[in-house]
């Protein structure tokens, strides 16, 4: 079988994703980043003979089958479209489009191509989420009515090595990230397990300023966004974006008419599957508490991959799509990707506009696309020098303190 040739964009996350393709017997042949230090970082991490490019258009001329987009979070669309135009397959992390107009452009371009598009959302492949998917698919929970998801990622703050790796200049997207935007890690597992797609969204944020004298350029006061969606199957989801409260956890709960399943916060890969006495399936207890485990076949592979093994399984799913000549299943397909991005974008607008609900457009419908084809509102700076057009949080005037910025410039940016 022909070995696939993979190119990767993004010296940090792009390189980490590419490593998984090497584990799966693909050849990583080219690497692209506009920052020389990031190119060197990626090459050293891969420890492989790869061609290096600081120009994306020249990178695309390299002989390859697929491209990993691990560049800045909100800037995948234009690169994906260029890949489509060259017939290259796309593995894109995480949201597919940073604006509503980009979602329209992405879909229109994809429909003119033969490229496979895969949203590289890895959390559904975490072992406890795979177990929850299996139980939902069994039907023993009955009709799914309600589900919860939390991606909670607190950090000590001010860690210079982390800031240098992840948010290394003041206009970096992480310093301006609204709390609804980084949504696929909480929403993706719910969509995968239930098969539902959000159709209406509203959101609330909770503000808490950073008052410590630590290096920081973060301009978002909010610590969490709580997002609610009504879905196409009548169910309701309640979930967060990227949240920083309490103790670190990734937590999910799915409730049906006959039972419920959840992974247990702070308990590793343990899941809790519960039924009522009158609805428990034959051979099951009312309360079933056990470890979710990868298959014997996958244990060795996942033990050397990121995010608890989920990264390599996600890469394998993409490879299978290429080998079989098919688009991925929900929620990794391009329409699901744009729907999740729309939840992120319109959820933020809900928060900015009194928590009013917004309908998630059906972008299969060209009339729905036309409503948003010129909607380029963004809370982010662009690498092209463009500036934000809307606030990034509930307090548009919030900024780091003078001391925080002074420490950031001295320790992170190493300015004297």
Image: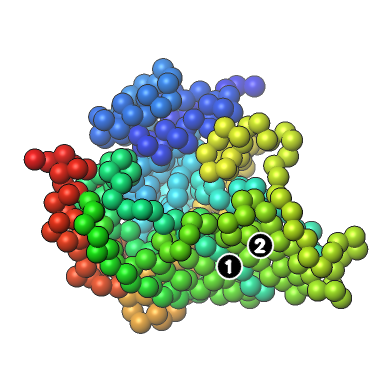
Q: Are marks 1 and 2 in contact (CB under 8 Å)?
A: yes
| Image disc number at residue 378 | none
Of marks 1 and 2, the one in the foreground? 2
Q: Is residue 303 above or below residue 63?
A: below
The residue wearing badge 1 is 148
Residue at 59% from the left image edge and 28% from the top image edge? 24
Question: Residue 341 or 35: which is nearer the viewer?
Answer: 35
Q: Is residue 371 left or right of residue 27?
A: left
Q: Is residue 263 left or right of residue 412?
A: right
Q: Is residue 271 above or below residue 413?
A: below
**Furthest residue in direction top, as rendered:** 49
The residue wearing badge 2 is 262
Question: Residue 49 or 299: which is nearer the viewer?
Answer: 299
| Residue 269 screen position, x and y as percent | 64, 50
Residue at 63% from the left image edge and 72% from the top image edge? 146
| Residue 257 screen position, x and y as percent | 75, 75
Q: For numbered disc 1, what is the local secondary structure?
A: strand
Say whether residue 315 is visible.
no
Q: Quadrant of the C terminus?
A: top left
Residue at 59% from the left image edge and 60% from the top image edge? 265
Residue 168 in which image quadrant: top left
Per the model, the C-alpha gap separating discs 1 and 2 is 9 Å
Q: For numbered disc 2, what is the local secondary structure?
A: strand
Q: Quadrant of the N terminus?
A: top right
């Amino acid at each position: 079988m022909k070995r696939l040739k993979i190119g990767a964009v993004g010296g940090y996350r792009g390189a980490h994703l590419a490593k998984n393709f090497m584990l799966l017997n693909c050849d990583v042949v080219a690497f692209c980043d506009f920052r020389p230090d990031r190119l060197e970082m990626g090459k050293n991490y891969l420890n492989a003979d790869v061609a290096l490019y600081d120009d994306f258009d020249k990178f695309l001329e390299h002989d390859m089958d697929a491209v990993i987009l691990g560049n800045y979070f909100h800037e995948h669309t234009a690169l994906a479209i260029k890949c489509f135009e060259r017939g290259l397959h796309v593995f894109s992390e995480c949201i597919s489009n940073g604006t509503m107009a980009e979602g329209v452009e992405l879909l229109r371009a994809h429909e003119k191509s033969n490229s496979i598009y895969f949203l590289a959302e890895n959390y559904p492949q975490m072992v406890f989420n795979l177990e929850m998917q299996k139980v939902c698919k069994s039907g023993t929970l009955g009709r799914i009515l309600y589900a919860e998801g939390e991606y909670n990622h607190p950090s000590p703050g001010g860690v210079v090595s982390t800031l240098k790796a992840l948010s290394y200049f003041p206009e970096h997207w992480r310093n301006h990230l609204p709390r609804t935007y980084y949504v696929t890690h909480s929403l993706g597992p719910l969509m995968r397990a239930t098969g539902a797609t959000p159709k209406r969204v509203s959101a609330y944020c909770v503000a808490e300023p950073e008052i410590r004298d630590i290096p920081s350029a973060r301009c978002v006061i909010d610590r969490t966004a709580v997002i609610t969606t009504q879905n196409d199957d009548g169910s309701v989801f309640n979930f967060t974006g990227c949240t920083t409260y309490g103790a670190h956890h990734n937590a999910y709960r799915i409730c049906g008419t006959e039972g419920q399943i959840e992974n247990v916060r702070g308990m590793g890969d343990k899941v809790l599957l519960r039924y009522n006495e009158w609805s428990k399936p034959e051979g099951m207890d009312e309360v079933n508490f056990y470890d979710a485990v990868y298959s014997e076949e996958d244990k060795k592979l996942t033990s050397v991959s990121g995010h608890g093994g989920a990264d390599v399984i996600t890469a394998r799913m993409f490879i299978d799509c290429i080998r079989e000549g098919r688009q991925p299943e929900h929620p990794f397909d391009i329409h699901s990707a744009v729907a999740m991005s729309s939840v992120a974008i319109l959820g933020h607008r809900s928060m900015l506009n009194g928590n009013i609900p917004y309908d998630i457009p059906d972008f299969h419908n060209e009339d729905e696309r036309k409503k948003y084809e010129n909607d380029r509102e963004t809370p982010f700076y662009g690498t092209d020098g463009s500036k934000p057009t809307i606030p990034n949080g509930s307090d548009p005037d919030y900024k780091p303190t003078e001391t925080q910025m002074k420490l950031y410039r001295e320790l992170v940016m190493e300015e004297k």
